[in-house]
Image: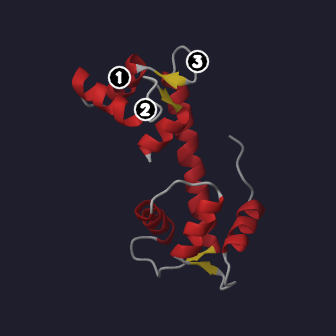
Amino acid sequence: MPRCSIEQWEALFKAADKDQSGALDVLEMRDMLRRGNSKMTDSQVADAFVFFDGPKGDRKITLDEFVKGMNRLEDFLAKLAALFKKYDADNSGYLDKNELKKILEASGHKFTDQETNEILRNADKSGDGKISFEEFMDACA
């Protein structure tokens, strides 16, 4: 996954800062995400806002907070991609039940077959019996 430059993040931030205040409020962030075809609920948008602003934030996201948050997100997504690739043993681009079970076992917790099946069912939004990378990201976020 290619990383975005600070200039790219700045351009995105400025386009989202509709009132040109130098900071994003939660509505500007929601609108930015929707323009990017995000299907996030309002609750998820609020959680994302706190991720950038911090739990004791001032309810505005500055450019610096935005860039730092986007860089943390890129790092997280890169780690997810590496984890997915590591356990996608057949390089199919999907995790089947056995591959998912190996990821779950690697977490240090023991999962029953029933629990594994439930996790698979919840993550598999397409209903094809396997988890795509997009479904994996959604399940981990």
How far apart are labels 3 and 1 at the CA level? 16 Å
Q: Residue at x 49, y 72 (%)?
A: 53
Q: CA distance from mark 2 to mark 3?
A: 18 Å
The first of marks 3 and 1 along the sequence is 3
- When the figure is inspected, residue 137 is found, relative to residue 86, above or below; the finding is below
Q: Is residue 121 above or below residue 24?
A: above
Q: CA distance from mark 2 to mark 1?
A: 14 Å
Q: Earlier in the sequence, mark 2 or mark 3?
A: 3
User: Are the residues tagged 3 and 1 within 8 Å (C-beta)?
Assistant: no
What is the number of the mark on residue 91? 3
Determine whether the residue tagged by mark 2 lies in a helix, strand or loop: loop
* Residue 129, x across and y down, in percent: 42, 22
Whether residue 65 is visible: no
**Residue that mark 2 sits on:** 124
The coloring applied to the image is secondary structure
- Whether residue 23 sits left or right of residue 108 in the image: it is right
Residue with the mark numbered 1: 101
Residue 72 position in % (x across, y down): 55, 55
Residue 121 in view of the camera: yes
Element under label 3? Answer: loop
- Looking at the rendered image, the disc whose residue lies closer to the viewer, 2 or 3, is 2
Disc 3 marks a residue whose amino acid type is Asn
Residue 119 numbered tag: none
Tell me if residue 126 comes above or below residue 49 in the rendering.
above
At label 1, counting other C-alpha atoms closer than 10 Å, the crowd grade (few under 14, some 14-19, many 20 or more) is many
The disc, 2 or 1, on the residue closer to the chain's N-terminal end is 1
Decide which of 99, 126 is in the foreground and name it.
126
Which residue type does callout 1 highlight?
Answer: Lys
Q: For the view shown, which residue lies furthest in the front direction?
A: 127
